[in-house]
Amino acid sequence: MTGSSPDWQNWSENINYKPESPYYFMPKNLAELQAVLAKAKEDDAIVRVSGQRHSQPPLVISSNPARTTYLVDMACYADEATNNQRMLVVSESPPQVIVNPGVREDELDAFLTNNSLMLKTVTAGGFFSLGGMTAVDVHGGTVNEGIFAETVSSFTIIKADGSQKTIAASPDIDFARVSLGGIGIVTSMTLEALERQYKDTLIGSVDFVPWATDEFNEDGFTQTFSALLAQYQQGGRLEVFFNPYAAQLDKHFLALGWQRNSMPVTPLSPEQPYDTCTSADGGEGDFGADYIKDQDLAIGAAVIAQEAGNSLEAALITGTAMLATKGWAEEANAAFSDLWLTQATRVMFMSYFIELPTLDAVGLRRAWLGLNKVAELVKGNGQEFYIAAPMEFRFIKGGSTAMSGTFTSNPGNTYFVNLDLIGFVPGNGAAYSDALLNFFAKVERYWFETLNGIPHHGKMYGFYDPSLDGESFSPEPFNPNFLEKLRERRSKFPEFKTFCKQEDPDGRFYNEYLQLLLGA
Ligand SMILES: Cc1cc2nc3c(=O)[nH]c(=O)nc-3n(C[C@H](O)[C@H](O)[C@H](O)COP(=O)(O)OP(=O)(O)OC[C@H]3O[C@@H](n4cnc5c(N)ncnc54)[C@H](O)[C@@H]3O)c2cc1C
């Protein structure tokens, strides 16, 4: 199996890897994948899967890996599990599909539609690989579902020695979900789906929801979201956008919702699935979300607005982004799709899961506190940093997945809110400004220390060193002392590490980032 040496960049462009020797492999079948693993053993290389490259931590690879690293792209991979078709319906009742992991979410979504099925929970865009969505604590907006990986009931992995193993039962499945690529390469997975007989089985809505009170306060927030969540708790999906400048503007949330329709009538029509394999173009192709047109101009303006010393421009850009989001969601709804995000601006995110634990006033107060922290930090003139994008938040059910930010000892009865904070940054690995780092550190201290939040594994975090005083920030994300503190807080981390060592005794998949996160 011969590799190639494309320049590798993640979608956010914070990681740039440009090796000269071949390191990128695109196996089409099990024998080719086994050959890559045999070569990796011979060359004593670390092996990682490269999905749609949307993760921002150096999960796939870093810009300067200390060890030889081989990347495996599964975009064209198929095997017997799917009758070599990459996606296969294996049961109609309950609806189950087996999928090879390089398939993108939107490709699967179209395949499911063509089989009168749909996913239990979806991300906004559909441009991630199933492998990446289940190796990380990726979630959607379905209020009564957990993270996406918890809709998968079994994983087949290939280990470093080329042998295959299927993991379907507890407790191992709790480590196979959100494995961070640390136990082997997932070659197929069984997904639990839902029936969808009509296009309008799910009905989308896009609403500017007025604040219940004149100020952005706890009572108003609780009132609004108690009412809203009551509508979405029976299989509904909800994504909400908060403009932290809205107190001076329109005092609305933007709520994108999808509900089960009790009287659907519109027949399904065949959909053309996205072709993940062809688009990968041997590793040189397009990965993940399309960037918006003229994004360099938009990013340049937003970078300036973030540090303008007043909120005027940042508020304008945030308001414009809310309107664009509304338009995209309306377009998707007209096509009966909940994958509304078809293009995006290259940004960095910090995303935290905060346990509520219930969707009552006490729980919702914690969601409000998390949002309000940001609103307070961007109030008035003279602040060092102003965010220039809305904050997005979604409600998710807790689960038993060891490495997920939604892990709880009381799965099924515990809810989390996920808060997303966006920063505009220059691309191509350029350093983040001190003002941005300091701002993210301030928010993170509050979300992590006060609200006991846990970072999403696919996004940026670790903006401060917990051993230093409250005003400091780390010169780079993923501060090692922060990671140590995170490790101390998560009792499941050592168990997961033991599981990795058991499944992968030679550490073939245990890259530098996992060593930093879990300990060597
Ligand atoms: C614009 C944007 C929007 C986003 N929206 C959301 C959202 O709505 N909800 C959410 O929760 N997250 C969201 N994310 C985060 C994103 O979903 C995750 O980072 C996800 O992991 C990306 O999938 P990917 O295919 O790009 O995986 P990659 O980033 O390529 O890989 C992620 C990890 O999965 C591993 N992996 C991939 N395939 C396999 C396999 N077959 N076997 C073993 N390991 C494997 C990789 O090695 C790596 O460790 C968003 C990120 C961006 C940049």
Image: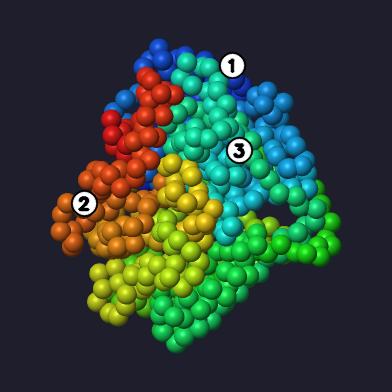
Q: Quick check: 40 above or below 326?
A: above
Q: Position of residue 282 (x, y in %)?
A: 55, 30
Residue pointed to by mark 2: 465
Q: How far apart are labels 2 and 3 at the CA level?
A: 38 Å
Label 3: which secondary element? strand
Q: Nearer the viewer, residue 409 or 88?
A: 409
Instruction: Please tell me whether mark 2 sits on a helix, a strand or a loop.
Output: loop
**Closer to the observer: label 2 or label 1?**
2
Please tell me the numbered disc located at residue 413: none
Q: Mark on residue 153?
A: 3
Q: Pointer 1: residues within 10 angstroms few (<14), some, or many (20+)? A: few
Residue sitting at 45 percent across and 33 percent down? 181
Q: Residue at x 71, y 49 (%)?
A: 194
| Residue of label 1 | 31
**Colour scheme shown:** rainbow
Q: Residues within 10 Å of mark 3 (few under 14, many from 20)?
A: some
Place residue 262 in its image quadrant. bottom right
Numbered disc in front, either 1 or 3:
3
Q: Amino acid at mark 1?
A: Ala
**Along the viewing direction, whichever of 282 and 42 lies nearer the viewer:** 42
